[in-house]
Amino acid sequence: MKIQKLIPLVALGPVLMATGFAFAENTAYMQLKGSVDAQAQAAPVPSFSASKSIYGENSMHEYYQVPDQLKRLADSTVAFVKKSSLYFDPVEKIYKIKNSIKISQAEYLDESEDFSSQSKLSNCSGAYLGKGLVMTAGHCVSDDPEDSGYFENFFMVFGWKYDKEGVPAQDFPADSVYSIKKVETRALEGSTGDMNSYRDFALVSMDRDPSDRQPLTLETEQTPKIGQKVFTIGYPLGLAVKINDPDQAQVYAVETNGFHTNIDAFGGNSGGPAFDSATNKIVGILITAIGTEFSYELNRDFSFIADFSLPSDTIEYKPHLGTVAFGSTLRSPVLGMFRNSNGAISILDENKCLITLPKGARFENRSLTFSLVTRVGGNNVFNKGRLMRDKQESFGTGIMRLPEEIKNLIRP
């Protein structure tokens, strides 16, 4: 799942990780990313789709819009919320949201887009399986205190939803908010996007057992099949829970550790359960929803100077000079990336080039190009963003098949 912070001088690898670049916008970017050994987590599957998006019509529904059967499933999902986003009122004995920000403001999103007036709160999604255990994606939590996803930084919250139109939950009873006691099992390994090698899952224990939530059921016998109808329930873009239409999406390809679908999903859906539409049993964990969410279009020609005089694979931003300085070894992949974006390149001297990107050029919010332009020129050189949309028959949302480690821990 953002307009990135300005960073004056950092190694390119950590930049890519910290800002969440989850896919390659073209071959040149892949070369650039590889040249500094940057490995993004939860990358979409580039051979099928370059983004997470809405496929065809938006199938995400609010809690108050769906039948009771789907509401009961949603009631047993959790939103992973940073502890710093909530505070506890000891008098009322409820957790309240500290600051509320609309997605349109947080992401420079066009106000006419779906969900633009809604507020964001959470980071990832999860499924309550009973025994005080919650299943999510491996990239959503970590047991490393130095990691931004360190489990002690998060609450797991039930009830982040819209009970009626325009009225989201503003606070949460104490019995709806849980800390993570322990990461029971976790994997984050293999080549991202390759469902034959990539494993991305976690099972965490709650600080206490919930008394009013029904466990969701895992499908432990049947394996996913091409054409099978599937859907997810989760918290896309950090918004209140969205329940996808069970009839909208299907399985398109099955691999060793996962399968590919056209489930509508965005960043924030990661870790959410993928259900078999016929049985409502969980068949997998949504893991490739940390991809592109928005598309932005330049509202003018935009030029800046690329200076390739730095001694190592780093990037230094100098917006006051209209310049981005790169390590000299990055010259070829960087120029290749901008050529593939229809940029015009003028050689100024042995180290410097003037790069001009044309008005109307489109860039996705997790692309390196978008980050470079916004860091030098600001957001205003772009029109406000639009949600990514693809044809109904395209696909790319990746689902992790249920791992044996989790099945073994939840068996009676």
Image: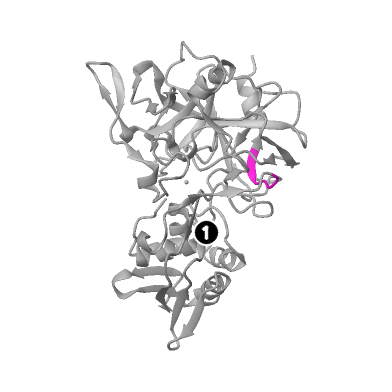
Please provide the residue range marked out in magenta: 393-399
Q: Residue at x 40, y 49 (%)?
A: 107
> Which of the 4 image quadrants contains residue 299?
bottom left
Q: Residue at x 57, y 21 (%)?
A: 70
- Give the structural element (helix, strand or loop) at label 1: loop
Name above or below for residue 112 compared with residue 353: above
The location of residue 404, given as percent across then percent down, is 67, 29
Q: Looking at the image, can residue 178 be seen?
A: yes
Magenta segment: does it hold 73? no
Q: Residue at x 52, y 59 (%)?
A: 38
The location of residue 36, given as percent across then percent down, is 51, 65
Magenta segment: does it hold 396? yes
Camera-side residue of 253 and 400: 253
Name above or below for residue 74 compared with residue 31: above
The location of residue 275, given as percent across then percent down, is 64, 27
> Which of the 4 image quadrants contains residue 409?
top right
Q: Residue at x 42, y 21 (%)?
A: 207
Q: Is 172 on the left or on the right of 395, as rendered?
A: left
The total of numbered circles placed on residues is 1
> Which of the 4 image quadrants contains residue 284?
top right
Residue bearing mark 1: 38
Q: Is 395 on the left or on the right of 203, as rendered?
A: right
Name above or below for residue 323 compared with residue 362: below
Q: Amino acid at mark 1?
A: Ala
The location of residue 247, given as percent across then percent down, is 67, 30
